Amino acid sequence: MSELSVTELSKELRHAIEKLETTGDFNQVGVVLRVGDGVAWIHGLRNAGYSEVIEIETDDGIVEAFALNLLEDEIGAVLLGSDAAVKAGQTVHLKGTVLSVPVGPELLGRVVDPLGNAIDGGAAITTKQQGIVERAAPGVMDRKSVHEPLMTGIVSIDAMFPIGRGQRELIIGDRQTGKTAIAIDTMINQGKQKTGVINVYVAIGQKRSKVARLVERLKKEGVMEQSIVVATSPSDPASLLYLAPYAATAMGEYFRDNGQHALMIYDDLTKHAVAYRQMSLLLRRPPGREAYPGDVFFLHSRLLERSAKLSDALGAGSLTALPIIETQAGDISAYIPTNVISITDGQIFLETDLFYQGIRPAISAGLSVSRVGGAAQTKAVKAVSGNLKLGLSQFRELASFAQFGSDLDAATKKQIERGQRLTELLKQSQYQPMSVWEQTASILCVTQGYFDHVSPHKVKDAQAATLTRLWADHKKAMEELDKGDKPSDDVQAVIKDVATAAAKGFED
């Protein structure tokens, strides 16, 4: 017998299958035609639906896959794991279920893979419920407008680009500019402020060492018990990287649907799009722009639309999304960034130049925006941060003229000096989220001019001294302010007196 090509062999195999006499139902049973790179092509299974689980009988036991390509004469199925044991000619059955993952409070405090298996070395996880991985987003009438704040603990975000429960706020910037740091601080703040918000962090193709450091930090801060970490590494199959954010969202939806609040962090969707591109090319889908398939927009829109604030009739729970996108050389007009920007309710843009200047978090006041968060902003912070964003944007425009200080008029010079102090105030170390009263008092100190005579490089010291004295001498008033209500005249007078007194120790 002469050697046959792969195509000819496939045709021969299909022809032989068609001639087979079988008592089984070929709508429910199929045969593997060929397999490779984590994708199995199957003949039969005419009743298979999208994302339905398929069982392949191998010598080493059952290997599961899920259907992604539904063609007339064959199915393209993506394997959930290694393809080493899968061979042509093996029998395939429909499991009768769509892809689902374990959900519930049993997952809290654990690190799991996208299929819900424990990977933290702890006991196996047994849950009472399963959540469908690919689930339709809540409809228009099932939603409520965003109106409750989700405090990040980061002054520059809570003051200028507030986030509300049920919002989708994109974190975007080049690599190593502090995107994950913002997400982690937000998670930590939910624990420190006892908000009751459940954190779900999904690492898509992240190094295992990075995930291990994150888990250690969450444990150290006492936040791990209200968090779920869904982790995949670069060495995992593309199918797991593709499934990770959908599976994690199903875990977060459990809390949303039970009247609780959950925070989703997708780190990051750029790697997710790359994994989907790899799968699509292996499934022989036509490539489009940058070799991505034509439905790459739908890939992320159907994911992020699942984050919502539910109506009172459905329990008023919420799922807030903080997707992360990595840019190349600050280019936010690339394919994936523009796609996700159009889906989300705003973005926090991190600038490389600001990061290397020591301004951290390196948030661009001009390119960042929160389109719906204003309605959810805490009244206390809102009352004192009205013109903060405008003032900071103007300062950064004027900063280039600072070297010609002698030629500037008094008003411009004052604006630049105020902007310098504001920039210093908004600098914030990682893992140090601030409460509502701390943010409110800090902003007042600069915007009202209490620190006008403090040297810019001493502003952080003056801020620390002010906050320490306020908490020591006026604890009751600060606790009242921490509830989020607009600060009264008496409280503002107290902050003024303490800040003015503290500033004297740091004047030039």
Image (tube, rainbow, N blue to C red):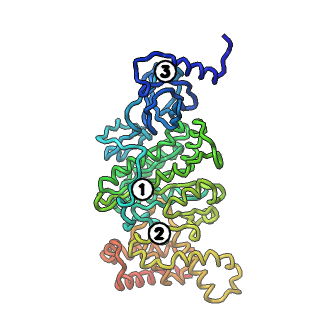
Depth check, front residue: 35 or 120: 35
Check disc 1 and give the amino acid type.
Answer: Ser
Check disc 3 and give the amino acid type.
Answer: Gln
Residue annotated with mark 1: 307
The answer to whether any part of residue 487 appears in the image is yes
- Per the model, the C-alpha gap separating discs 3 and 1 is 40 Å
Please give the name of the residue rendered at 67% of the width and 15% of the height, measured from the top-left corner.
3
Label 2: element kind: helix
The location of residue 486, given as percent across then percent down, is 36, 78
The location of residue 377, given as percent across then percent down, is 41, 71
Depth check, front residue: 100 or 352: 100
Residue annotated with mark 3: 90
Q: Toward which corner of the image does residue 197 lie, by quadrant?
A: bottom left
- Per the model, the C-alpha gap separating discs 1 and 2 is 24 Å
Viewer-side label of 1, 2: 1
Viewer-side label of 3, 1: 3
User: Mark 2 or 3 closer to N-term?
Assistant: 3
For the view shown, which residue lies furthest in the bottom direction? 410
The location of residue 469, given as percent across then percent down, is 39, 76
Cβ–Cβ below 8 Å for labels 2 and 3? no
Q: Is residue 12 above or below residue 188?
A: above
Please give the name of the residue rendered at 38% of the width and 66% of the height, measured from the top-left corner.
145
Depth check, front residue: 355 or 40: 40
The location of residue 58, given as percent across then percent down, is 46, 21
Quadrant location of the N terminus? top right
Residue annotated with mark 2: 155
Q: Residues within 10 Å of mark 3 (few under 14, many from 20)?
A: some
Label 3: element kind: loop
Q: Is residue 442 above or below residue 108?
A: below
User: Mark 1 or 2 closer to N-term?
Assistant: 2
